[in-house]
Image: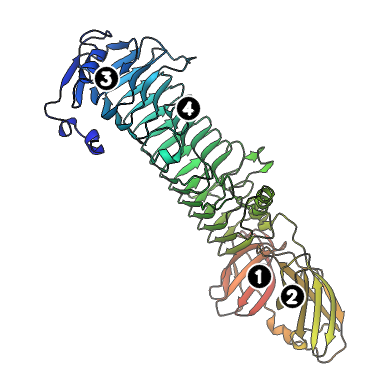
Amino acid sequence: MRRAFICVLLTISGCLSAVAATYTVTTTKDGVEGSLRWAVEQASQEEETSIVEFALSSADTVFLDTTIQITSSVKIDGRSNDGGKVVVVPSAEKYVLFDLGKYELDSVVFEHLKFQRRTFKRSINKLEGFANVDSTRGEFVLRDCDFKYLESAIKARGASVDIVIAGCSFDSIVSDCIGRYYENEEESWHTLKLYDSRFSNNMQNVVRGGEVKNTPLLEVNNCLFEKSNYCIMGTSAKMIISKSTFLNSKYEGVNIGCDNQCQAEVYVDSCRILNSGRYGFSCNLDGGEIYLTNCEISGSGQENVTLTRMHYTDNYSKLHMENNVFGSVENGGVGVLLDASHTVVRNNVFYGIEGESKYWGENSFALCDKGSDTLLIEGNSFGFNGEEKSPNKHGDLLLMSETELRYWLDRGYDYVRDPKITIRNNTFLQSSPKAIRMDSLRLNVTISENLFLETKDSAICNVKPLSVPVITNVSKQGDDIIVAGKVDSMATIELFYTSGAPQTAEAFLGRVETEPAGGFSFSIPVENVKDKDGSLCFTATATYPCRATSNLSEVYCATFNDSKIAENVSSKIIVLTPNPVSSYLKTGIAEDVSYQIYSVDGCLVMSGRTVGGTIEVSHLLQGIYWLRLIDGKEVKVAKFIKESTMN
């Protein structure tokens, strides 16, 4: 019967029989009485778990001429007479030190030992290592052991083997530290648990996992991975990685690869992944769920994080990122690249991401979504590092859904054609050139209650030029003025009265949806327009499904000699004071109402509600802005000039 896991980690006396046999190693020679091989062979003849101990000093080195076969449960305790660790080394490079063959072993424990080759040398045959674990069941435990200069540490293919590594050190391992047999890609360990261990200077993977269906659990807690090619390449059904640090990986810190049958659950919490050569954390998650929380990831060569689907199938994938900090990307690429069935990005910090990406063919954004079906971006901070300003040099948020739409439809995969995206309560600092950039007019995007501070170009922009509406005709029919026009595609058109000067809008007159081809028409009662020297002048904007708004259209003026055209519209014109303004803008409206502030190129830079009829605009850059006040169904528009706060 397999003994409980806790019994292996606690004192052996509480789990083993009180009469367990003990065999003592008294010589460094191999194959003689008192040798390590002799002690293990004696222990193998016992029915109960036996103990092998050492009566040697830490200065002694035990040489093994050939592999030692372990055929029964045993605990090998390498504490020396002086409290150190006994060293075990191979005499040659063509064998593993220990072989746990296909025996039903309840438990094999190694503790307080050093295993190493005498010099660091890449082996050609790649046979030399610490142990092959090929048991059909049982627990294999390493505690407080050191491994150095070996070809590999552990290779496993026992479908029911539980491996526990606690307090160990793996240094300069040529091949995988803990890996599977490559003859059969589906064979690996049953569960693998790494606690309080250090992995450094390893030439391949620290952990190379098996197939999901045969490896239910990979757990990593409080471990250090540094200066290795790859740290974790896992495909276990459930992966829990917590309180661990990944430093200076040559290629990738954590790489989790799942095909379209993958149903893995991945939890990465309270980890630091710094200065990875390619990716800090990458995963293809078709059908999987990933939770990335409370982590710091920065300094990666290509992307700090890339979490995307491999195929667009019916498998549901979930991605949740919360309370993380994402810093600079050294050699280009975006800071975080995402794409899942359901994505939540909440309360994260993106700062100082400024790489110029050769991979992308353009400058990098802090956060890029390639087409998540539903996406919530909420409460994040872009451009701050603690109290310091550290803006993302080439932009904050990029939505690329239309690019992915074409890519996957061309390959015959299904795709959600109307992704629902919500961007709210985020703070964007010194975005340059864009805070939010969208590649598509098809996106169903809601942008609300965000704060744009010191935006250097425009806060919200669509890569595709936003078509400006054209007013084609103004005429009078009965007691109504008819304003007709067109725009390139479906949009919401807002009509304004203007004095006739270019890019001026003095009163809001109405809002309509265009026809499918882009045509629109307004019917305005004559009492809602103003006659100025016999002329009526109008201008309009177009707001597209992505919530991006075009510039004002060219002014269209028409002359009417009709006494019924009154000047009642003057009541809808508001006067802002002071204007120009440096800090606080007074609207003259006592009741608090919702407001939106647009730059002259039609991009939303601020929104919220007035406080006592006042809006603080001190953080806006110098320039000309449009203010829209929304009070129920009534909208009032006015222009103001923002001057330097220092004036």
Judged by depth in the image, the label closer to the viewer, 3 or 4, is 4
Quadrant into which the C terminus falls: bottom right
Residue 391 as seen in the image, left or right of residue 171: right
Of callouts 1 and 3, the N-terminal one: 3
Circle 4 packing at 10 Å, graded few (<14), some (14-19), many (20+), is few
**Extreme-left residue of the structure:** 19
- What's the residue type where badge 3 is placed? Lys
Of the numbered discs in the image, which one, if any, rests on residue 627?
Answer: 1
Considering only vertical position in the picture, is 142 above or below 528? above
Mark 4 = which residue? Answer: 182
Q: CA distance from mark 2 to mark 1?
A: 15 Å
Judged by depth in the image, the label closer to the viewer, 2 or 1, is 2
Q: CA distance from mark 4 to mark 2?
A: 68 Å
Q: Are marks 1 and 4 in contact (CB under 8 Å)?
A: no
Residue 600 as seen in the image, left or right of residue 590: right
Residue 97 is situated, as x and y percent measured from the top left of the image, at 35, 17
Of callouts 2 and 3, the N-terminal one: 3
Residue 472 is situated, as x and y percent measured from the top left of the image, at 85, 73
Residue 394 is situated, as x and y percent measured from the top left of the image, at 64, 46
Residue 297 is situated, as x and y percent measured from the top left of the image, at 49, 42
Mark 3 = which residue? Answer: 85
- What's the residue type where badge 4 is placed? Tyr
Q: CA distance from mark 3 to mark 4?
A: 32 Å
**Extreme-bottom residue of the structure:** 563
- What's the residue type where badge 1 is placed? Leu
Circle 1 packing at 10 Å, graded few (<14), some (14-19), many (20+), is many
Mark 2 = which residue? Answer: 495
Q: Nearer the viewer, residue 264 or 308?
A: 264
- What's the residue type where badge 2 is placed? Leu
Q: At 20% across and 20% down in the image, what residue appears?
A: 45
Q: Nearer the viewer, residue 144 or 386?
A: 144
